[in-house]
Structure formats: structure tokens, C-alpha cells
Amino acid sequence: TADGKGYLGSGFIVDKNGILVTNYHVIRYAKEINVKLKDGTVYPVTSVIYNDANRDICIFKIDAANLPVIPLGDSKALRIGEKVYCIGNSAGLDYSFSDGVLSGIRDLNNLKWLQFTAPVSSGSSGGPLINSRGEAVGVVTMGMYPDASTAVVQNINFALVINEIKPHLTASSKKTLSEITNLSTAQIDNYFMEINQCFLRDDYDQAIVKINQGLQIEPNVAGLYSLRGLAYGKKGDFERALVDYNKALELDPNFATAYCERGGIYFLKGYNDQAIADYTKAIEMEPNEARYYSRRAGVYSKKNNFKQAMADANKAIELDPTDDAYLSRGLVHSNSKDFDRAIADYSHALQINPYSVQTYLIRGLAYVEKGDNDRAIADYAKVLEIDPGSLQAYVFRAIAYFRKKDCEQGWKDVHKAESLGFKFGPDTMVDFMKCSQGAK
């Protein structure tokens, strides 16, 4: 509990000598924090070991010993669809328990967030997301808000992956509560959390509004410029994105994430050498960050430097064998026309995340390149099971049907794609007509 305004949240013990984890937003305005254990014992927080508004994490210390500890799992081992559980003070009800499934893993601002369906309520923030082995694999941090109202979208909740906090559990620096809860700091931190909400619901315009408000309070926060660059990039405004990333790096020349994201903008603009330079700079700063290697692999592949692309893709899998890492290496294989190895990597990615629309679409294209139209059609059908409104699936499946001379099904998908707003080029339509005439 946090005194002052009577906040209530959840947390969990990660070390028997009194180290606990909760959300930063639970304590950000607190003048005093007390921890109540299950046996009713209350301990005051004596110091803060680590706090981060962007991660929405606070790790703190109480003077206690021989406490029960929840074991920490490995978030890299998580699979979409597996069972997960929450325990916390939902709506003030102590030790409320709920269950659901892991429905997604989202990347946001160089952090990984777990999307899950277990119901959570106010007071659950800071509690553990638990796997079937009883291990904490995430820190419950937020529900999805559709707009500025307080109505939470049901069954769309998020937790920061547990691996994000592990390096900070042994931090030697300690702060007092007053050092992390002063008003100006709390205001900026609050903007970071609201901005993250905007990104998770893909509301980039509102994210920019919140970032601008934060910059009016503190105009020299590199992280805010980097986030605004990310929002402009998502909106396709690459010039403004570059301006903001340049400003972020001017304020903080050691900002690896800003180098990575600026590299992405350079790549989208076709400036491959500049993109490689930025990814290389990010890798120099954070050599164990897998996504930097994956992204650089994509640029090397675009330049037909498949040897270096494969080295980077393999390094990414070594560091963090996620579905994205295998997808990245599969794309390198596809670009070098090695479709068998590409399909093997896409299939491995789908074992990790069997709900990835993007991976099914890309594997379908690889099957088409091999002339295996039936398997391509099966992949596009799987996409439509997951996302019945997928325009790409109808377009790609139409092409696959025509290639196997199933013109009736092909035209059905053409008409469906057109009803969704897609316009096939005149040359493509001529090819479809020729296919139909040849099939008669």
C-alpha cells in the first residue's frame, strides 16, 4: 500500500532477504510504502534498488529474512497459446487468482511485452504472470485502454517479460523513495506510461500528443524524442522521424535504441549503408541485443551480402531464439533463393508462435516459389482462420489458385479482395483471364 492517496497494488518476492518487484506506476506518487505479506506482517520499504517508468518496474527492499520466494522462469521459453495465471489484489481482494492463455508477444520501444487473456482488475498491477510450472514469467502491468476513458478492453492485458528485470535484481545502487517520486519526475514518468498505452493500441496520433505534452515540461528528454520518432515512422512520416532520432542522439549519444530505430528509417528510405552503420553502432553499445543483428541481417540480405546476413541471423537466434529471429533467418534464405531452408525456418517460427499471420503469409509465398501451391493455399487459409479480414491472404491465395488452374476458386478470392478495397493491376487481370481461358 502507498500512503498519501491510498494506492493499492500487488508485488512479489524475488529474494528471501526482502527484495520485491512491483510496477512503478503503483508507487510513483507515494510518500510511504508498506508491504503486507500473506501472514499479515507489514514491513516498510527501506530503499529502492531500481526503477524504470518505461518498463513500469520498481524493485525495492524491505528489512526481512527467510521470506518465501517465487522462482523466476525464462520468458524466452514461452509459447503462444500456453496457459498462464495471475495472482494479486484484484479490486482490493487479496490473493485473487485468475487464468488464461498467452495470446501474443509484442515488441515496443525495444522491450518485449506479453499479451494474455487472464482477467485482471485494478489492484493487480505489479503481480506476477505465472506459467504452469509455478514460475514468474512476467510482471503484470496494464490492461488495454481503447481511449482516454477508464474502460478496460476485456481479456487484453500486458505483462513485461521477466527477463527484462533479471539484470536489475542485483543492482548495487539504492535510492530513497523521495528521490524517485518528486513531482516533475513523476509527471514525465506518467507520460511514458500513457505513451506506451497509445503504442499498444496503435494510436500514434495520440502518442504524439502525449509526447509533445511531456516535452513542454522537460524539453531535453532523449527518450521522448525517440518515441516521437517511432510514432512518426509508424505513420510513414520518415523525415520527421529522422529529425527526432537525430535530436535524441544529440541529447544522448549512447542511446542504442535510437540508433536501431533510425537505422530502420534509413532502411525504409533505401539508405542501406546508413542503416548498417546505425545497427552496427547499436550492436557496439549492446552486443547481446538479438534484434539489432536481425535487423542488420535484413539490410545485408537486401544488398545481396548473404554471408554477412546469415552470420547476423544466426547470432540473433543464438542470443534469443524467438519466432522473429527464425523468421528473419528464413527471409535471408528466401532472398538467396534457398526456399527449403527458408520454409524450415518459417516452420520453426510457427512452432514458437502458431498464430503469426505474417509468418504464414511469408511461408505461403515460399511454397509458391517452389511450385507447391496446395501448401501455399493451406497457409493462406490458416491466415484467414486467424484473421478473416486479411486482404493479403485473399490476394495471395487467388494467385495460388490460378497457378494451379483452379480458376473458379481464384475468381472468388479476386472478388473478395476487390470487395475489401484491393485493385489488381491490369497485367495481373489479363494473366488471370488467360489462365481461365487456358483452363477451359
Image (cartoon, rainbow, N blue to C red):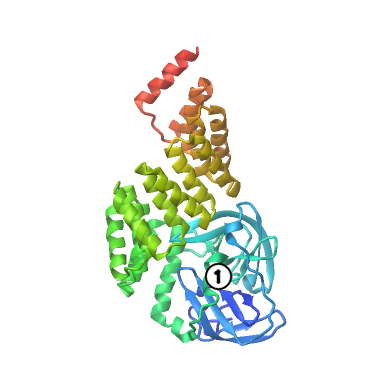
Residue at 31% over, 48% down = 272
Residue designated by label 1:
166
Q: How many numbered circles are shown?
A: 1
Residue at coordinates 46% horizontally, 32% vertically from top-left? 395
SS state under label 1: helix
Q: Is residue 339 above or below residue 90?
A: above
> Is 211 located above or below residue 406 in the figure?
below
Residue beneath the point at 53% across and 43% down: 345
Residue sitting at x 36%, y 58% = 280
Compared with 128, 34 (above or below) is: below
Res 227 visible: no
- Residue type, mark 1 in image: Lys
Q: Dividing the image into 4 quarters, which one contains the N terminus?
A: bottom right
Q: Kindly indicate the quadrant of the structure image that contains residue 11.
A: bottom right
**Spot occupied by residue 388 in the image (x, y as percentages of width and height):** 54, 39
Q: Residue furthest front?
A: 307
Q: Is 349 in front, or is 234?
A: 349
Relative image position of residue 192 (x, y in whole percent): 42, 68
Residue with the most extreme right position: 39
The quarter of the picture where residue 23 lies is bottom right
Viewed as shown, does residue 64 lie left or right of 293? Answer: right
How crowded is the residue under tag 1: few (<14 C-alpha within 10 Å), some, or many (20+)?
few
Is residue 316 visible in the rendered image? The answer is yes
Rendering quarter of residue 287: bottom left
Residue 61: image location, x then y, percent: 57, 83
The spot of residue 365 in percent (x, y) is 48, 34
